[in-house]
Image (spheres, grey):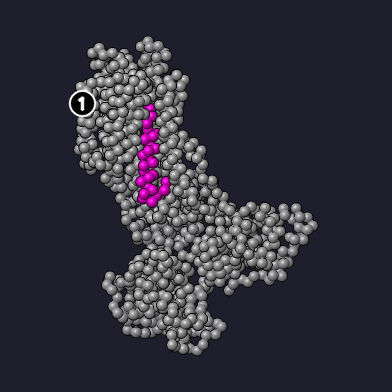
Amino acid sequence: MFLSDPDVSEGKENKQGPEEKGKNNPSQEKHSETEILESHSKTTSWYSLENEVIFKKLATSSRGLDPEEVAIRLKEYGRNTLPSKKPPGIAEIVIHQFKSPLIYILLIAGVISLLLDDIKGAAFIFLVVIINAVIGTIQEWKAEQSASQLQTILKIMSRVRRGGTESQISAEELVPGDIVLLESGNRVPADIRIFRATNLTIDESLLTGESEAVQKTADIMREDIPVSDRRNMAYAGSTVITGRGCGVVTATGSRTEVGMIARAVTETVSAKPPLLIRMEEFAQKIGIIVIAASAVMSAVALSQGTAPIEVFFLAVALVVSAIPEGLPVGVTVALSIASTRMAKRNVIVRRLSAVESLGSCTTIATDKTGTLTVNQQTARKVLLPPENYFEVSGEGYVPSGEIKEEKGSTPETKDMERLQKFARAAVICNEGTLYQEEGKWVHHGDAIDVAFLSLASKISINPKEAKKEVKIVAEVPFESERMYAAVYYKEDKSDHIRVAVKGAMEAVLPYCRKMYTAGGEVPIDPDSLNRELNSLMEKGYRALVVAEGPVQGEIGKEAELEYVKPELTFLGIAAFIDPLRPDVNEAVRTCKKAGIDVIMITGDHPKTAFAIAGELGITDSREEMLTGREIEDLGDPELPTFMTTLEKIRVFARVTPVQKMQIVDALVRRGHFVAVTGDGVNDAPALRRANIGVAMGSGTDVAKDTSSMIVTDDTFSSIVAGVEEGRVAYDNIRKVTLLLISTGLSEVILFILALLVGLPIPLLAVQLLWLNLVTNGIQGVALAFEAGEPGVMYRKPREPEEGIFNNLMIKETLVSGATIGLIAFAVWMWLLGEGYEENWARNLLLLLMVLFENFHVFNCRSEYRSAFRVPIRNNYFLVIGVVMMQALHILAMQVPFMQGLLSISPVTFQSWFSFFVIAATIIVVMEIFKKIRAARDKDIVT
């Protein structure tokens, strides 16, 4: 029974008080009334109050507010818009490129060079910083442009009643106390307490995560119930599916449930991306090593009697050799390439640092509705009495699929007749529409009605034709109180009235006298049917029954079954579920192979969540599932018991947005790198708190604006593709790092050994910059184009505490750096010993170092595999880059300007070839190293 509107006269009386007060003291009235409303909007459980009390608290009536009062409240409360964050401008994006530890080190090195009047060195350093900023800015600007098409969730029109007159206004102009009228297809413009509802169902999945539309009522609810159970409230951003309703606005803008989530999002601190954490640690270590090495070298030089000014220049040269100046550009290029590859696989990256984050994640916390599932109710099973089950294929509302017996065989003719009788009754008793328009299937109405139409088409019943064959006499729309819908109709050329009914078992079964079996109509067996129903519901299905039968006499004003009392024949049960996306099973299996934990966090019913999780293999034990109420019982999220309990859970059901954020926060604090997926407003706080937030392309603007990346096609498999590209990106960053750090180490070894034996500085600072920024920089950029190695998705995620340099990379860096450094020192000592002039010897040594880099880059293509087993086709850019780099250096030796800048000159082919052979030793050494390691670790492919 619905609560009716308070009398208009009562509404006037309620309204009179504030108006009269306003005449006596307008400013006092405005202040006191808005203060009261502000207090009410924050503390009142509107769903637990009677209409008269609500109208009194909001100082309004069923006639609506007067225009004068609307103006006052609009000024006080502001426009009905969500708090939003402006997209970053070009200046902000440019500044963001300089917020990197390595960039800080480079800028310091550049400033030192300027102070020493080393204009050439400073120019080289600042050039690489600018190049890095340009590349990063272009990539992030493109990503922001892709994401900037999003619109705010409340930019919609609304029908209101003000001063007794109905009108259409922008939803931004709504204020608390406004009377809003809702009908199917409307977006709910604000938080509304419903006081009249007629077959009103609302899709609240964006807020609660529940896949089924909620039947709304005007009944009073008890206090302290979650948002998902407040059936007399309509919340901003949700969508009216069926029916009509009327209600009073209780909150607007940031005071709505959506607004509070938006505020929580802005107040939530995002976890740092894994790459940023690792790069900060790496830069810190590099800084410490460089300072320590410079101090040691300076002490040695001073002890040998070297002048302090020369020691200072020597320290600067060592700093230049040790700092990987080309690394920022190499990292940025690697991330940019991965970002482009991700875009081709339907993932838009909004921040370059987020590219690698997916590849680092140890846990994916995924939403259910719309992420793992298609967010469309679909008939999966049909039970014909007494126990004949049929399986239905296809996903969503598109009527493509077929119906088979459980064993996979086509239904026999008699069974198909029964199925068609069942489907025809479901079509007649149906308010939905499903039709094809311009090659696409369009649907309107309740999700279950549309799903029944899709099912009927799979059973060879044309819904449109079936409805044409009957004449509707009377209808009883579905309402939550009665739990069924009924349509009375006459067949063509028949005066007899029949009724088609669909609804809940407990509502329809009492009117059924018979059930339609393969042997015809037989007496009903309620116990058997209830057992089958319970079995379906335990598996997470939503089950509805269909019945039909003749009606004696005419239908009066009261068409409900309890008045007509027809003798129905039970036709069957349809079992619905929001089905999995076609590719999600394989995607979850891939995650498991990759060592990534997949957990489900949803606002949906525990049975449904468990059924979906079981089908995906996320869990097979109810002990690994926790509900929102059970999370509340755990107490403070800061408690150790809260953290340890969550570690064992794989499915979280009926959780609130705040609880979802607490779960993600607990996982992050436990040391997991967490990727959170979602599409609704309810997902936004968790998306922001996670290391990486992944929003669905069809999701809400709030979710997309909060996320680090957006999956444009909504498929879970695209997320897994993002993980793969993220891992490839990180591998390539490691390869670039290995190349630059190992060659930098070789330069440090060369310098220290030369100093210890009293030899001159082997290379000038400008020559070191040429090596590190230009020649090796080109190779580093080319190496970033490397394709993924086999088995990238069969490796476990890196340990969260593991830095860029793990044991393997340290060993490879030491072996290769020491090899190059020792050989280069031996050559330097030999050249000077043979009487070569110092500048000429440096010229030859610089050529040797360039050639070493040419060869070593091929070692760096894989940390595990032989350089000869990595196909050239995986990276043609690298071959081109190596040739360009060597050609560039040879050209520089011929050009007078470059000769003066770098203190170099041409060499003979014989000299060039001799050093070419010497440099090739690095390939031999690293091949031996990889063979030895492969022999010890049999699982590594070389």
The residue depicted at 67 percent of the width and 53 percent of the height is 75
The residue depicted at 32 percent of the width and 45 percent of the height is 796
Instruction: Using the rendered view, name the quadrant where residue 516 is placed.
Output: bottom left
440 in relation to 270, above or below? below
Instruction: Using the rendered view, name the quadrant where residue 857 is placed.
Output: top left
Residue 299 image point, x, y percent: 38, 16
Q: Taking the image as drawn, is residue 779 in sight?
A: yes
Q: Give the residue at mark 1.
A: 917
779 in relation to 370, above or below? above
- Of the 4 image quadrants, the one containing the C terminus is top left
**Where does the magenta region start and end?**
321-349
Left or right of 576 on screen, residue 919: left
Q: Amino acid at mark 1?
A: Val
- Of the 4 image quadrants, the one containing the N terminus is bottom right
Question: Foreground residue, 548 or 182?
Answer: 182
Residue 852 image point, x, y percent: 27, 27
